[in-house]
């Protein structure tokens, strides 16, 4: 047997693995924004569900994003939320707001 040839059974197994691996990788990917929003759990609870400060799960995307932008700009003061919001790009704030708005 040449080193670059495989028996038909091994070739079939390899082909199946190559087909299924990308699907398994996609299935394992967390929802967009979830990893970014995981930083919120210490104050707002897992996925935005208290206890803690405000429960933010299920709030409207527009309201969440607007509030995050207000914190980022300093409009809401220079507290802890402002410091957190300044650490994110606009696209990341949108992803966080979208993820949290979809939590029930």
Image: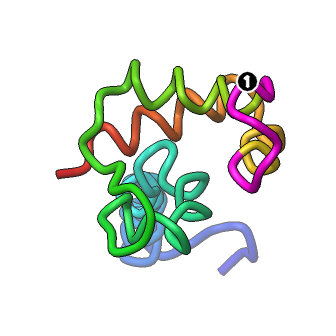
Q: Residue at x 17, y 51 (%)?
A: 104
Residue 43, relative to residue 97: is it above or below? below
- Crowding near the residue tagged with mark 1, few <14, some 14–19, many ≥20 C-alpha atoms within 10 Å: few
Residue 85, given in percent of the width and then of the height, sits at: 73, 41
User: Closest to the observer: 45 or 79?
Assistant: 79
Q: Position of residue 100 (x, y in %)?
A: 37, 45
> Residue 77 lies in magenta, yes or no?
yes
The range drawn in magenta is 73-81
Q: Residue at x 52, y 40 (%)?
A: 96
Q: What colouring method underlies this structural image? A: rainbow
In this rendering, position of residue 80 left or right of residue 1: right
Instruction: List the single residue furthest toward the left.
Output: 104
Nearer to us in this view, 23 or 15: 23
Quick check: is 35 in the magenta stretch? no
**5 sits to left or right of 51:** right
Residue of label 1: 75
Position of 2 relative to 68 (above/below): below
Q: Main secondary structure of the magenta part?
A: loop
Question: What residue is rendered at 33% in x and 69% in y?
Answer: 50
Toward the viewer: 20 or 88?
88
Q: Secondary structure at mark 1?
A: loop
Residue 97 vs residue 32, the one in the foreground: 97
Q: State the image coordinates of residue 92 (x, y, percent, origin top left).
A: 65, 34
């Amino acid at each position: 047997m040449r080193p670059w040839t495989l028996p038909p059974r091994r070739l079939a197994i390899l082909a199946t693995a190559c087909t299924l691996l990308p699907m398994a990788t996609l299935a394992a990917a967390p929802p967009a924004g979830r990893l970014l929003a995981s930083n919120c759990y210490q104050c707002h609870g897992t996925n935005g569900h208290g206890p803690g400060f405000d429960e933010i799960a299920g709030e409207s995307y527009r309201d969440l994003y607007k509030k995050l932008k207000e914190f980022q700009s300093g409009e809401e003061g220079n507290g802890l939320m402002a410091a957190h919001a300044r650490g994110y790009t606009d696209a990341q704030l949108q992803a966080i707001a979208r993820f949290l708005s979809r939590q029930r």
